[in-house]
Structure formats: C-alpha cells, structure tokens
Amino acid sequence: MHRLTGQTERDGKGGTWNAYLYLMEEAEEAMRCVFRLAGAEPSRVCHLEGLKPAGIYEIRSEDHGFIGEMSGEELAKEGLQFSVLEEEASDILLLRPKSQ
C-alpha cells in the first residue's frame, strides 16, 4: 500500500484529499482509493509509484467507467488528476495492464 496524499488530522488540519494505492503484485493490478474531504480544493493530482514504468495500464473508475490508458512512467511522473468528486465523496480506480 502506498499513501498518495498527506494524512488528515483529527482537528481538521492536514490533507483534505486522502488517496491510497494498493498494488496486487501477483496480478500486476492496482486499486486507487480516493476521498475528497470537506473543504478540499476542487481537484488534485496524485503520482502513482510502484507500477511497471513500461507497462500500459487501463484506468477504470467504479463510478464513472473507462477513464483512459497511461504508462506506469506517465502515472508516476505526470500523475492522475481527480476533479469529478463532490466534497465528502469517494471513488475507486482500477488499473489493469493492457493486454499486448
């Protein structure tokens, strides 16, 4: 598991977006869970580490369907922007290696 954002604190300080990347190494898949908390800025970019740089990943949202395809290197360097969540909402992204 990789934490992609800062930790939110009990007094409301700290990060206003929480995102985690779970790598399923045997399956070469990943799952990103993202939460937009109250008062959070409208969009956030998270850089996903731990994926195969040369791999091409299909990115699919549980709530919004197919998002696109990016390489592991692009996901690490450019990151993935989230801007469709309302405050106090969450989403799950599944990243699967594209079949060659």
Image (spheres, rainbow, N blue to C red):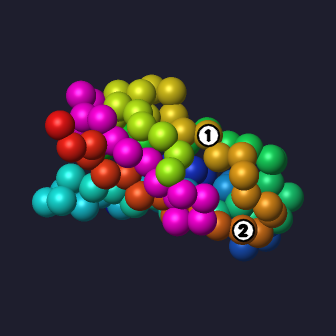
Q: Label 2 sits on what residue type?
A: Ala
Q: Nearer the viewer, residue 65 or 48?
A: 65
**Is residue 32 shown left or right of residue 53?**
right
**Is residue 7 shown left or right of residue 20?**
right
Instruction: Quadrant for residue 8, please give it.
Output: bottom right
Q: Could you tell me residue 79's position as x and y percent?
A: 51, 34
Q: Which of 78 and 40 is in front in this view?
A: 78
Against 96, residue 26 (above or below) is: below
Query: What range of the chain is rendered magenta?
Result: 51-65
Q: Could you tell me residue 42's position as x and y percent?
A: 80, 47
Dot 2 or dot 1: first in sequence order is 1
**Residue at the outermost left position:** 26
User: Can you identify the residue that label 2 sits on?
Assistant: 89
Q: Which of 75 and 64 is in front in this view?
A: 64
The number of discs equals 2
Residue at the image position 76 percent from the left and 69 percent from the top: 88
Residue 81 badge:
1
Measure the C-alpha gap from mark 2 to mark 1: 15 Å
Residue 7 seen from this side: no
- Whether label 2 touches label 1, CB < 8 Å: no
Q: Residues within 10 Å of mark 1 (few under 14, many from 20)?
A: few
Q: Label 1 sits on what residue type?
A: Gln
Give the position of the C terminus as an image quadrant: top left
Residue at the image position 31 percent from the left and 51 percent from the top: 96
Residue at the image position 35 percent from the left and 31 percent from the top: 71
Against 35, residue 97 (above or below) is: above
Instruction: Quadrant for residue 53, please give it.
Output: top left
| Label 2: which secondary element | strand
Residue 89 painted magenta? no
Q: Could you tell me residue 54's position as x and y percent?
A: 24, 28
Give the position of the N terminus as an image quadrant: bottom left
| Label 1: which secondary element | strand
